[in-house]
Image (cartoon, rainbow, N blue to C red):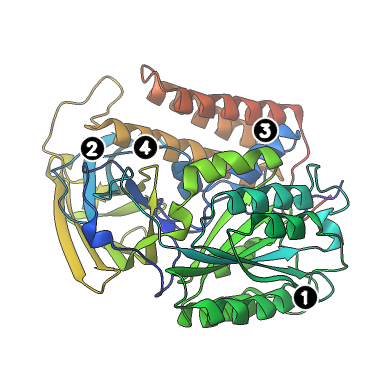
């Protein structure tokens, strides 16, 4: 079977849902609720689907499948802090623990919370223009099977099931060409919409550009008629007709965002271009998710609907400034270069998340100075959907508290989990990089990362963390057996 690409690793940073557009949003100023009930997480694709799927198939994943931000996005990594009384609140924690080499290091986790109350949240009405790949690679001849076409069929019905009478839905297909299968239709007319979905069938190659150029005018015409307008593209993302480069797709999405239209990409099965997915989901108005089986649809919708279509803030910037005498040693899911004194992240649009994700930065004292003066200043700036600018700052520090037998002082459970996950996924990536040229070295690297992780999570009693140990064991078994290494496009 041909293995086409799936980009299942997050292409942004810690775990805010990154997307949205100027026309989106509800009356968030009216929301109030228990602080910290929801997180705010950024990201394009929010999972490790590619890596996990390849391991299940008996293949060693490529190094690109292992990213800290993708691992973080699959876990709930909250930080506690002072009561939150604004839409978004900054969270931070600092501690000390050995790095992958066993040397002492200071660690800073950055997170977010929101005061939005999930019990009273009401999403804005939606116009959704579903733009569906019907090319041969999708397998539309088996709409009830496990092909990308089968996943699309289940996903489209799941979306329609969650729409209300105030919403609208249109259906565009693209294969060798594009066509409007269903014009804008009230979501109340469910039988008509479902019939159009059920009638989808195969039609040639993958001219995604044609599909998007057909979908966006429909979406733009709906701006102002509902609270939000969004194009949803469903494909195995291996375009071979029309625009095929990231920059061309990015321009189409940017033009749509400027008109007030958001974009959600669904990469289906094992077939999507990482470069195209990355370029499109990093811009304002786009987020992305990957699904490899029809069984993945319901968990995704339960976890992400309606948050995936409901932005709460724009133009967010998070900055970390080290204290004098300290510099960045490494960053995990946060832009930053070793040796710098500061790092910052900019996010076009913020969505809510059921999980509280994480960003992580490792610091070192300059010229071997003491860790007892470790400190950093965090700052947060964003604009609410009604245009109000907001700012917040927070200082984190380590004051020389006693370390445990493993050389750790990690004051919050979320920080301990995040450090453990970061070192594990980084070890997996390094082992996968080496696997193609030196399998023995790759096995040794992964064994060391696995043992460190087992030590880090001892006593946590966390099923989600335990599952990652099982994943590491499965990957290690494949490497020891000399299993073939999968990639984004190989056989």
Q: Which of marks 1 and 3 is nearer the N terminus?
A: 1
Secondary structure found at label 1 = strand
Secondary structure found at label 3 = helix
Q: How far apart are marks 1 and 3 (CA)?
A: 50 Å
Q: Which of marks 1 and 2 is nearer the N terminus?
A: 2
Q: Can you give x and y, in whole percent of width and height, for residue 324 in the image?
A: 14, 57
Q: Nearer the viewer, mark 3 or mark 2?
A: 2
Q: Check disc 1 and report the residue beneath it.
A: 178
Q: Which of marks 3 and 2 is nearer the N terminus?
A: 2
Q: Which of marks 2 and 4 is nearer the N terminus?
A: 2
Residue 289 numbered tag: none
Q: Check disc 4 and report the residue beneath it.
A: 419
Q: Which of marks 4 and 3 is in front?
A: 4
- Where residue 341 sits, quadrant-wise, is bottom left
Q: How far apart are marks 4 and 3 (CA)?
A: 26 Å
The residue carrying pointer 1 sits among few (fewer than 14), some (14 to 19) or many (20 or more) residues within 10 Å by Cα, namely many
For the point 76% across and 35% down, the residue is 57
Secondary structure found at label 2 = strand
Left or right of residue 33: residue 41: right
For the point 37% across and 65% down, the residue is 25
**Residue 75, relative to residue 130: is it above or below?**
above
- The reply to whether dot 2 and dot 4 touch (C-beta < 8 Å) is yes
């Amino acid at each position: 079977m041909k293995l086409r690409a799936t980009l299942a690793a997050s292409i942004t940073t810690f775990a805010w849902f990154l997307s949205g557009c100027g026309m989106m949003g509800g009356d968030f100023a009216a929301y109030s609720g228990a602080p910290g009930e929801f997180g705010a997480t950024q990201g394009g694709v929010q999972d490790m689907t590619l890596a996990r799927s390849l391991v299940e198939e008996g293949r060693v994943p490529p190094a690109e499948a292992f990213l800290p931000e993708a691992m973080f996005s699959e876990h709930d990594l909250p930080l506690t802090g002072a009561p939150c009384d604004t839409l978004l609140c900054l969270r931070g924690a600092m501690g000390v623990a050995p790095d992958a080499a066993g040397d002492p290091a200071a660690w800073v986790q950055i997170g977010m919370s929101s005061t939005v109350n999930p019990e009273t949240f009401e999403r804005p009405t939606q116009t959704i223009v579903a733009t569906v790949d019907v090319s041969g690679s999708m397998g539309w001849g088996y709409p009830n099977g496990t092909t990308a076409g089968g996943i699309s069929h289940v996903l489209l019905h799941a979306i329609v099931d969650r729409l209300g009478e105030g919403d609208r839905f249109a259906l565009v297909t693209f294969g060798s060409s594009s066509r409007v299968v269903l014009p804008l239709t009230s979501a109340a007319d469910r039988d008509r919409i479902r019939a159009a979905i059920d009638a989808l069938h195969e039609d040639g190659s993958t001219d995604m550009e044609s599909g998007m150029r057909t979908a966006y005018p429909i979406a733009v015409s709906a701006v102002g008629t509902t609270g939000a307008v969004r194009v949803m593209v469903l494909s195995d993302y291996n375009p071979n007709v029309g625009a095929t480069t990231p920059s061309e797709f990015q321009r189409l999405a940017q033009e749509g965002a400027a008109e007030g239209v958001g974009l959600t990409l669904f990469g289906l099965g094992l077939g999507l271009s990482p470069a195209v997915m990355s370029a499109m989901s990093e811009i304002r108005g786009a987020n992305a998710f990957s699904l490899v089986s029809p069984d993945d649809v319901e968990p995704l919708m339960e976890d992400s609907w309606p948050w995936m279509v409901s932005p709460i803030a724009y133009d967010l910037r998070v900055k970390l400034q080290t204290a004098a005498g300290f510099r960045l040693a490494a960053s995990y899911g946060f832009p930053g270069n070793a040796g710098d004194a500061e790092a910052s992240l900019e996010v076009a649009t913020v969505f809510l998340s059921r999980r509280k994700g994480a960003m992580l930065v490792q610091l070192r004292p300059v010229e071997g100075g003491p860790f007892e003066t470790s400190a950093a200043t965090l700052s947060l700036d964003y604009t609410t959907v009604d245009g109000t600018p907001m700012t917040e700052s927070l200082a984190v520090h380590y004051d020389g508290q006693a370390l445990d037998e493993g050389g750790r002082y990690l004051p919050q459970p979320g920080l301990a989990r995040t450090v453990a996950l970061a070192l594990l996924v980084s070890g997996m990536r390094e082992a996968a990089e080496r696997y193609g040229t030196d399998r023995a070295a790759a096995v040794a690297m992964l064994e060391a990362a696995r043992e460190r992780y087992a030590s880090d999570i001892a006593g946590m009693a966390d099923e989600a963390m335990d599952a990652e140990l099982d994943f590491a064991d499965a990957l290690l078994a494949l490497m020891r057996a000399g299993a073939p290494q999968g990639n984004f496009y190989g056989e």
